[in-house]
Amino acid sequence: MPLTTLVFSKYQSDIVRELEEVLSGGSPLFEMLRYHVGWADEEGKTVAGGYPGKLLRPSFCLMCCEAVGGDWRQALPAAASVELLHNFSLIHDDVEDCSAHRRHRRTLWNVWGEALAINAGDAMHTLAEIAMLGLTSRNVPPERVIEALRISNQTCLRLCEGQHLDLSYEKRLDITVEDYLNMIRGKTAALFECSFGLGALLGTENQAVIEDLRRCGHLLGLAFQIKDDVLGIWGGEAIGKSDNDLLKKKKTLPVVYALEKAAGPDRTLLLDYYAKQTPDDDDAGAIRSLLRRLDAAEYSEKLGKDYYARALRELEESGVVRDARESLAKVASLVIERDS
């Protein structure tokens, strides 16, 4: 059993129960939401098996709460809210990216159409807000509930800003590595930062510790996305997507790096590829080989490891006790070293 599963197992059944309660409505809309998270089929019938997602973000939230001396069960509504916010972004991203499959099943818009999928995504965001308000029933002081909601809403705005940049880059070939990093600071790192920060907020009043863990989460989120970019080109079907990021012409880090570095025939090959309406597997294979030749994979892996090392330094310098630091570091390492 992976270490992430072993460490997070103490939290995950409670997170799922919290999510089940929030997603228990009886209308067709809730059937769509349960379909998205893998609990129902396209006819609304219950599907056997557990929650299909990794639950990384809500688990980190609870782990951070416990690491700073808090009661992680008290933070369960915040953890559920983080996961619902993540799923809200996935539903909208699938529509905007025209992604037909996620987690080896059809996406919401692919089953019910774009309009209903957008509405379902809006509902998921609203449920994230409602879930967070559940902190009031866990004896969390009102001022902390308000602060948690502020953090959540600021994170949602940053997610939208990151997605805006991602979409705006689709037709551009002048994107720099710094442009890319600015995009993932919102699109991915913001939610990791939120998870770590909320957990710390609900476990301690020490602002310095909260800030240290927030920064740790942000840096780990950058490393996570960069690893995802590498897997999106070289990870195959294990990542649970219908095709890789090259066929979708996504401007992920290896591609952005190559666009900055390529010259002569190599640059011409890249520009021709991204000018094609529908590149095929052979086209993508040629670009994959070119990226390797330009050391784009090596560069990306190194940058991701650099951010991971910086995340560990933030963790080491925080006021978190040694055992908790070591547990967080072990799980973080497997998140970055994963192959799917």
Image: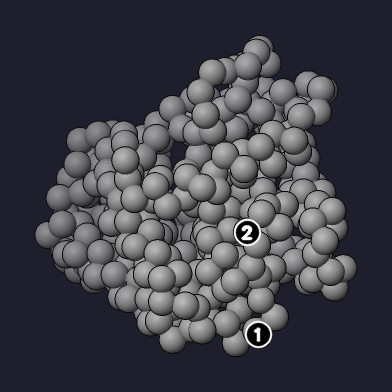
User: Which residue corresponds to the image point at 50% horizontal and 33% vertical from the top-left?
Assistant: 52
Q: Is residue 307 visible?
A: no
The numbered mark at residue 194 is none
Q: What secondary structure is marked by label 2?
A: helix
Q: What secondary structure is marked by label 1?
A: helix
Where residue 172 appears, as percent x and y from the top left, is 45, 60
Distance CA(mark 2)–CA(mark 1): 18 Å
Left or right: residue 195 compared with residue 147 = left
Left or right: residue 254 compared with residue 117 = left
User: Which residue corresponds to the image point at 65% horizontal and 85% vertical from the top-left?
Assistant: 207
Where residue 217 appears, as percent x and y from the top left, is 50, 69
Residue at image mark 2: 72
* CB contact under 8 Å: marks 2 and 1: no
Q: Quadrant of residue 296?
A: bottom left
Q: Quadrant of the C terminus?
A: top left
Label 2 is placed on what type of residue? Trp
Q: Where 170 falls versus 259 (above or below)?
A: above
Residue at image mark 1: 207
Label 1 is placed on what type of residue? Gln
Is 177 in front, or is 26?
Answer: 26
User: Which residue corresponds to the image point at 44% horizontal and 86% vertical from the top-left?
Assistant: 317
Is 143 in front, or is 272?
Answer: 143
User: Which residue corresponds to the image point at 69% horizontal and 26% vertical from the top-left?
Assistant: 32
Q: Quadrant of residue 177?
A: bottom left
Mark 2, mark 1: which one is toward the viewer? 2
Residue that extends furthest to the left in the rendered view of this protein: 293
Q: Quadrant of the N terminus?
A: top left
Total numbered circles = 2
Instruction: Pick whichever of labels 2 and 1 is earlier in the sequence.
Output: 2
Q: Quadrant of residue 120?
A: top right
